[in-house]
Image (cartoon, rainbow, N blue to C red):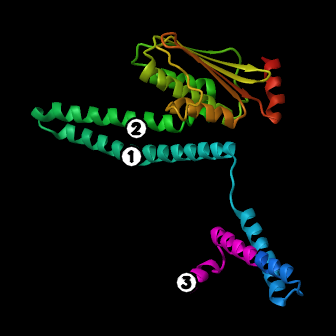
Amino acid sequence: MYASLKSIISWPPSGENARRFTLLLCACSTLGNLAVFCLSTRLPLILLLLNMATLAALLVQYGLSRKSIKFEPQELADRLLKVQENERHRLSRELHDDIGQLLTAAKLQGQWLKRRMPEELQEQCAVLCDTLEETLTKVRDVSAILNPRQLTSLGLEASLRAHLLKTLANTPVNWSLECHSRLTGIPEEMALAAFRITQEAVTNILRHADANNLLVRLQRQPEGLTLSISDDGQGFAPASDPGREGQRGMAGMSERIDQLGGTLRVTSEPGKGTQIEALFPWAPRALERASTHKVMH
């Protein structure tokens, strides 16, 4: 009994203990007031102190509740996306800086050994060097996918074109990237969201769609930046709630669109291909800049 009471009145109290202690004080205060009312006697000092303690406990509970972190669903989605991007950047740095350097050192060592190997071992050493070179290239490609650094330096259009060239180079997919207006002045978070959505769509096409043709279209509109991705693949039945029905790629697209206050529409049927249309609205401070670029070009 003493141990449980000690756990309740420990300081500083946890939220759960504060609620239990407040409930206990309220119950005691209510019973005491009921007894005074039934007996029609004067209010005892102990009951007055109990009421004051109840008020103090309620104030503590209010303070703890204000300090507690409460997130709305949209805020949770925003924070989750930020955590994912930070983790991708961290992994990209580790791949590029640590593993990339080790593979480069191994490749140089292999080349050094090749020059000193006997003739009968030259072929095996050459295969080893080629394998190291191919692995280093793959690591750099994955690093670039995780953290598209070229978005800042090259811009959205050039970054998407480079990604499509690299990803679809050895596939039967014929692709086209159309930009009907210059994409200068695009906010960084909008450019990153458009890049990630296109990246996810291309991945889905390669994994599931078995498509022959792909069209990616970007256009600056007065209301925002529009992104359209169309393919002639197998298609699928879009889920009303992609996250719950296992369509994690589509769920990620929706979260990125929602984070920027945009809209996403997916039109697809089995055997009839897929069309993804996304609208990224301009932020109030970027709206004037976007309109200026539209007039200039």
Whether pointer 3 and pointer 1 mark residues with C-beta atoms closer than 8 Å, the reply is no
Q: Where is residue 253 in the image (x, y as percent from the top left)?
A: 59, 31
- Secondary element at image label 3: helix
Residue at 11% across, 33% down: 119
Amino acid type of the residue tagged 3 in the rendering: Ala
Q: Where is residue 38 in the image (x, y as percent from the top left)?
A: 84, 79
**Residue 99, labelled with which disc?**
1
Judge by depth and name the residue closer to the eye, 54 or 97.
54
- Secondary element at image label 2: helix
- CA gap between label 3 and label 1 equals 54 Å
**Residue 3, labelled with which disc?**
3
Amino acid type of the residue tagged 2 in the rendering: Val
- Characterize the magenta stretch by its predominant secondary structure: helix
Q: In this view, does 49 lie above or below 27?
A: below
Q: Is residue 223 left or right of residue 85?
A: right
Amino acid type of the residue tagged 1 in the rendering: Ile
Magenta segment boundaries in residue numbering: 2-28
Q: Where is the C terminus found, in terms of image quarters? A: top right
- CA gap between label 3 and label 2 equals 57 Å
Q: Position of residue 59 (x, y in %)?
A: 79, 72
Residue where numbered disc 2 is placed? 139
The residue mark sitting in front, 3 or 1, is: 3
- Secondary element at image label 1: helix
Q: Is residue 80 left or right of residue 63?
A: left
